[in-house]
């Protein structure tokens, strides 16, 4: 048999996954990694390339061992990674400096650029679809200001997934879907815009070649083969950003198709033509997709999955004990209890993530409003349901913002990630949005998307679109309840007003924001 390997470098861990050519998972090796705040550098999140390469290569070797296959039978491999994380190299291709995705050390630089280059963020956003908050330009400026001896040696830049491929092939390159999240990129042309760097006094000759997802960089080098036990005959193929390749792994590859990825953060993505410019109000992020000619309008809901985990661990010890006794997941127990709570959860209003306001984004203080002292209606079941409803309401608001500037009529949503395992959560999403909700069978969508790109490079599939048609299988479908949809529309309007009132408390200094973008 022949196989494909996907390497998924996420925020919290890296995974090496082996698939057969029909998309069946053969083995998986996963190991957590930690991104450390550097001493004396507030809000930094460094990426240790030395330690993390050791972790990555161990996962590669272990996945081959677990699969019990000959590595010569791995036709090709590809990689995907957290977006925004960057690696800088010297002229010999040696790593100099790297940061993970939410490194926010460059807050002063973001503010400097906004204050001293009037209109520059708006202009760059109109080209790239990205703001400065987590972009590469402020980070490069920070390095120039704070570590000039390192900055002077910088000869090339890539994303973290690209770094893995460079370690394996010896070739530094990037793709539009991941490289585009630097903010130094053209959505329309799918290439670097080096003049952006030049305009703010940053090196403009450090940008590597751009390959489309599925293009071959080379083969595994003899050095990398010794490090990983991979064969030198295995092709190394360009991958992409985790959300975009995850979308391909969910079959969301054509214009107008929509997905919600329900993980620690929730992303709402809508495929649009790459010639559609980003909205003037800068509320929505726009990224190049892994499909040439297609971009993705993206809304983000902060911490939806993390908030649910916090609620479970802080308040639901009894449900955890029951779940253990029954041999099921704690969330399943909570959903069983929450299904009898009426729409609106007795008026409980969670305040966590705001809807997407990409140009000037900050959140209110975490809270619950409108609680009751009646334990029969205000309890763990009703609060749990209110959190499920809230994640769906904020997602619906973000999707409406995308509809308004793209004129895409959203009628069907692909729902994936940990949240999609919940029967109740899926139905609530359908009722809140008024859309048909489809849940795919695959549980490793991002890794599957990466394996698809490897398969394209190996000639197994003609394209990512072809691969997605072949490999994506649907498991469940949910239709909206029109009466519930009307009720949720009323609740959504109320939530928006309440959230603005809570933001005003942050503005007055009476409460503390859950999160603020750098430079705000």
Image (cartoon, grey):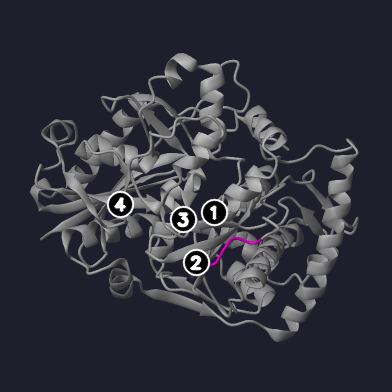
Q: Earlier in the sequence, mark 3 or mark 2?
A: 3
At which x and y percent is residue 414? 50, 71
| In this rendering, the label closer to the viewer, 4 or 1 | 1
* Residue sitting nearer the eye, 318 or 423: 423
Lateral position of residue 127 relative to residue 335, left or right: left
Q: Main secondary structure of the magenta part?
A: loop
At which x and y percent is residue 331? 59, 58
Q: Earlier in the sequence, mark 3 or mark 1?
A: 1
How far apart in space, not on screen, are marks 3 and 2 (Cα)?
Answer: 20 Å
Q: Secondary structure at mark 3?
A: helix
At which x and y percent is residue 283? 68, 57
Q: Earlier in the sequence, mark 3 or mark 4?
A: 4
How far apart in space, not on screen, are marks 3 and 1 (Cα)?
Answer: 20 Å
Q: Point out the stretch of residues depicted in magenta.
A: 273-279
Q: Which mark is residue 127?
A: 1
Q: Secondary structure at mark 1?
A: helix
């Amino acid at each position: 048999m022949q196989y494909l390997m996907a390497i998924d470098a996420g925020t919290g861990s890296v995974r090496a996954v082996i698939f057969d050519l029909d998309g069946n998972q053969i083995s998986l090796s996963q190991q957590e990694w930690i991104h450390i705040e550097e001493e004396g550098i507030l809000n930094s999140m460094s990426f240790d390339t030395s330690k993390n390469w050791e972790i990555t290569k161990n996962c590669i070797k272990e996945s081959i061992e677990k699969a019990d296959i000959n590595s010569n039978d791995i036709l090709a491999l590809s990689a995907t990674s957290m977006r925004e994380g960057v690696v800088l190299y010297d002229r010999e291709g040696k790593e100099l400096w790297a940061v993970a995705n939410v490194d926010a050390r460059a807050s002063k630089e973001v503010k400097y650029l906004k204050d001293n280059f009037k209109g520059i963020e708006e202009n760059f956003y109109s080209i790239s679809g990205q703001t400065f908050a987590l972009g590469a330009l402020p980070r490069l400026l920070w390095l120039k200001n704070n570590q000039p001896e390192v900055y002077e040696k910088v000869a090339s830049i890539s994303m973290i997934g690209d770094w893995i491929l460079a370690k394996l092939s010896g070739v530094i390159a990037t793709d539009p879907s991941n490289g585009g999240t630097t903010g130094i990129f053209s959505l329309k042309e799918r290439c670097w815009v080096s003049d952006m760097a030049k305009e703010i006094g940053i090196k403009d000759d450090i940008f590597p070649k751009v390959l489309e997802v599925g293009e071959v960089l080379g083969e595994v080098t003899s050095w990398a083969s010794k490090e990983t036990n991979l064969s030198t005959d295995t092709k190394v193929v360009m991958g992409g950003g985790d959300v975009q390749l995850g979308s391909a792994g969910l079959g969301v590859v054509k214009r107008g198709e929509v997905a919600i990825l329900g993980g620690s953060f929730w992303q709402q993505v809508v495929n649009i033509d790459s010639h559609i410019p980003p909205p003037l109000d800068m509320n929505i992020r726009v990224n190049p997709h892994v499909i040439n000619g297609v971009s993705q309008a993206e809304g983000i809901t902060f911490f939806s999955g993390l908030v649910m985990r916090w609620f479970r661990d802080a308040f639901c010890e009894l449900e955890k004990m029951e779940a253990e006794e029954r041999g099921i997941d704690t969330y399943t127990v909570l959903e069983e209890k929450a299904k009898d709570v009426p729409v609106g959860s007795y008026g409980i209003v969670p305040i966590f993530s705001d809807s997407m306001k990409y140009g000037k984004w900050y959140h209110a203080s975490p809270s619950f409003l409108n609680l009751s002292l009646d334990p029969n209606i205000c309890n763990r079941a009703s609060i749990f349901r209110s959190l499920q409803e809230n994640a769906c309401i904020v997602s619906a608001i973000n999707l409406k913002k995308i509809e308004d500037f793209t004129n895409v009529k959203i009628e069907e949503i692909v729902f994936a990630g940990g949240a999609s395992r919940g029967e109740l959560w899926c139905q609530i999403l359908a009722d809140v949005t008024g859309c048909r909700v489809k849940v795919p069978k695959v549980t490793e969508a991002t890794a599957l998307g990466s394996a698809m790109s490897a398969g394209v490079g190996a000639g197994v599939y003609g394209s990512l679109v072809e691969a997605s048609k072949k490999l994506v299988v649907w498991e469940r479908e949910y239709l909206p309840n029109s009466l519930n949809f009307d009720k949720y529309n009323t609740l959504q309007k109320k939530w928006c007003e309440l959230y603005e009132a809570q933001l005003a408390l942050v503005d007055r200094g009476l409460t503390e924001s859950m999160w603020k973008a750098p430079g705000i």
